[in-house]
Image (cartoon, rainbow, N blue to C red):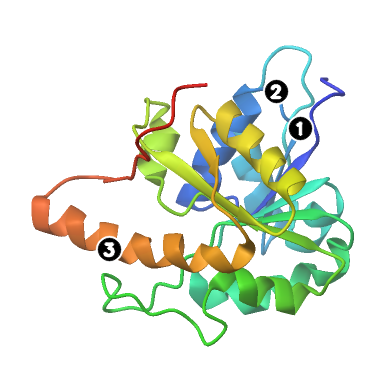
Amino acid sequence: MNPSKPAVALIGGTGDLGTGLAIRWAAAGYPIVIGSRTAEKAVQAASLLKSPAGARAPRGLANAAAAAAAEIVVITVPFASHDAILDEIRGSVAGKLVVDTTVPLVPPKVARVQLPPEDSAAVAAQKRLGETARVVSAFHNIAALKLRKGEPIDCDVLVFGDQPADREVVIGLARDAGLRGLHAGPLANSAAAEALTSVLIGINRNYRVDGAGIRITGIQAG
């Protein structure tokens, strides 16, 4: 076990994005807890993850228990389930860093930007969880399939949060997943990346590509 790395719970960790991130963070030595509506499904997903020798074995728990068992909680659920899941874990995330990856996609027109009344899913999450949770928003524009395959991803991760120190933690998580994370300002700015996801979906369709992403130019590597 690597005591220097915090335990990470992925709520909705049996979905495509949650699985892709879990694969990469487990391989990097993070203690992983998979959360799902049913513990059985979470246990099954956790059993498929591979961790380095000496690392804590991934675990699977129901969502609220998974959130309680980790220091960092990552939300990887569809927008339609967002409010219900936040209500489910609210009591388990007080004082914790919550990383929200949610994009407000509203079928059937998911290539059209449709932001919620709060202007972003991340701001809505902060309001719903209350002031004791520290919400950071990231990983909106990353192709889940590429994460799962483990292949290099030519895409930056824009990280939004009101506290620079919290953003820096998430930039470290991005780095350990093989991605470049960038400080992108306060949580309110998350609206830009959330909206951009719908734009990228349209680009994928129009140009028949799988997983178009973004890269910020002018910043030297490292």
Crowding near the residue tagged with mark 2, few <14, some 14–19, many ≥20 C-alpha atoms within 10 Å? many
Q: Is residue 121 left or right of residue 88?
A: left
Question: Which residue occupies the foreground of this view, 130 or 18?
Answer: 130
Q: Give the residue drawn at x 37%, y 40%.
A: 216
Q: Does the CB distance between marks 3 and 1 fall below 8 Å?
A: no
Q: Quadrant of residue 5?
A: top right
Q: Which residue is mark 3?
A: 199
Seen in the picture, residue 119 relative to 174 is either above or below; the reply is: below
**Image quadrant occupied by the N terminus:** top right
What's under tag 3, amino acid-wise? Val
Instruction: Please report whichever mark, 3 or 1, sits nearer to the chain's N-terminal start.
Output: 1
Q: Which residue is mark 1?
A: 31
What's under tag 1, amino acid-wise? Pro
Numbered disc 2: secondary structure: loop
Query: Distance from label 2 to label 3 (Cα)?
Result: 34 Å
Query: Distance from label 3 to label 1 (Cα)?
Result: 34 Å
Q: Quadrant of residue 92?
A: bottom right
Q: Is residue 204 left or right of residue 42?
A: left
The answer to whether one can see residue 134 in this image is yes
Q: Position of residue 109 (x, y in %)?
A: 26, 78
Q: Give the residue drawn at x 19%, y 53%.
A: 204
The tag on residue 29 is 2
Q: Quadrant of residue 175?
A: top right
